Amino acid sequence: MKTVFDKTDFLIIGGGVAGLRAAIEVAPHGSVLVLTKDKPAESSTGYAQGGIAVALSDEDEVGIHYEDTIKAGDGLCREDAVRILVEEGPEVILELISWGAEFDKEGRRLAFTQEAAHSRRRILHAHGDSTGRELERALVSKVRTFSDVRRYDFAFTVDLIIEDGRCVGALVLRDKEVIPIYAKAVILATGGGGQVYSRTTNPPVTAGDGMAIAYRAGAVLEDMEFIQFHPTTLYSPSAPQFLLSEAMRGEGAILKNINGERFMPDYHSMSELASRDIVARAIISEMVKTNARHVYLDLRHLDKDFVRRRFPRIYSTCLQFDIDITEDLIPVSPAAHYFMGGVKTDLEGQTTVKGLFAAGEVACTGVHGANRLASNSLLEGLVYGARTGMAAVNWGMGNGEWGLEKYKSHKLKSANWNIDIEKIRSSLRRIMWDKAGIIRCKESLTEATEWLKQWNFTLREGVFGRKELELKNMLTIANLIVDSALLREGSIGAHYRSDFKERGESWQRHILCQEGREIKWTE
Ligand code: SIN
């Protein structure tokens, strides 16, 4: 029978760590529907290697984790949000272990590794370098213990349904059919938008859809200029842009230019363990100096058995491309990795639109400021996924309503234009990488704006298919990144302007974007 519309108490868009953790929180209170854009495991969580930061070791304290996070955020973290992250972190990890998550151990004790800008070894990991997968496995098996949780896979969210300023559901594309799904509370957990850059560690699903649909629904987005670039992804024409975890440098790997010279000590006293923005820019500078497209990561001096045991997934993946990480230099270059900005929320995940909540990378809780401390994102997904779930329960059981059901399902007509979507997508990604990437300036950003204007015009109207809708979302967030990066005339955290190398006058403020309004600074 044809579905006219669907109904659930809680609609969760996204099935990574934040979405699953939120689902566990809301499930005892009503019916839940979790949407994933692709197959269930296809989210950034499943690709997370290095681990999850938490102050649980004997030599660590939450206060030190707090200080490291604030320092990495370069003065722009929201302090109360960071305090919640580090204080609630140990509890959510122990809870996850009680649900069956297995982290690596040394003897009977949890094993902690080191990553850049952490002043303690505090990163938990699982199966060496498959931490995200283990988190997902444990969360999915916990979600399965609730009877009233449904899941739609390959479901693309076209738009949110807004009635009287409240979010009451979403229009969702499945098998060419757009189905309205009404909900008392909607939680966005769609991850980031790395695909807007031609080099990215993110899986293909991360097109910034959640940020774009929230923007169209009137929500405020914050600090879209802060994109973190991971210094080390595999660089080989025949291989995918595979992440080479920072934990490799934490365990002693070093960076060399193509002439075989170690260079990081010339850039920073922390050498390879300086913060990601510093290492990424140093790599770019060495690539320019040596006229090369990559530098090398070198683990050859480390014990081979240790390397194979500690990084089994990276070892076997590189081997598929004829690189033995215990014996060969690994060609690497930086890639877009994480959005610090996103849909603005309060400490409970409430966005500026009633009934709409957000958690994980799509959200901007303020914990990461201008630069995220490595391995804080999975922790944020757990801590704020749970808090957001709780807030959605309070809203849904109090003010939440199902809406007027004015939308009915309809077939999506296929787009009938002479527009080469793949070409625009690829050009967009290249322009963003070249003009609004690791190093930006007014001239490069203005050039990007000109390209974006053309594509905005091309895609301004028409009947859209899924690919076109996704491209439109990418274009929306590309515009917001470029506009915010132009406005911030200064260099702070991951945002580096070669024409304004100092922090700039307004550095302590945030940038807000809302559809139909001028992009503006916070007071
Ligand atoms: C990595 O393993 O290097 C990525 C971890 C993170 O981005 O937090």
Image: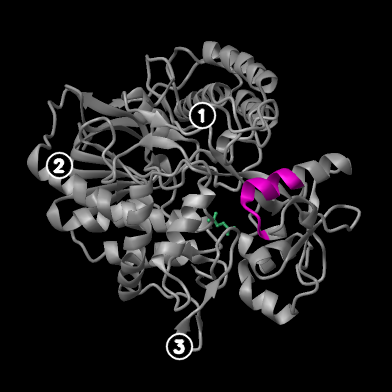
Residue that badge 2 annotates? 395
Mark 1 / mark 2, whichever is N-terminal = 2
Q: Find residue 154 and report its image quarter.
A: top left
Magenta stretch holds residue 281: yes
Residue that badge 1 annotates? 474
Q: Is residue 389 visible?
A: yes
For marks 3 and 1, give the CA distance: 46 Å
Q: Report the mark closest to the observer, 3 or 1.
A: 3
Q: Are marks 3 and 1 in contact (CB under 8 Å)?
A: no
Sort mark 1 into few (<14), some (14-19) or many (20+) by Cα contacts within 10 Å.
Answer: many
On screen, residue 84 above or below 237 = below
Magenta stretch holds residue 384: no
Residue 447 percent coordinates (x, y): 67, 17
Residue 255 percent coordinates (x, y): 77, 58
* Residue lying at 26% horizontally and 48% vertically, measured from the top left: 388
Front-most of residues 41 and 487: 487
Q: Are marks 1 and 2 in contact (CB under 8 Å)?
A: no
Using the image, tell me which numbered label, if any, was put on residue 108. 3
Magenta stretch bounds: 273-282
| Rendered image coloring scheme | one colour
Q: Quadrant of ligand 1?
A: bottom right
Local SS, label 3: loop
For marks 3 and 2, give the CA distance: 42 Å
Under mark 2, the amino acid is Trp
* Residue lying at 57% horizontally and 72% vertically, measured from the top left: 128
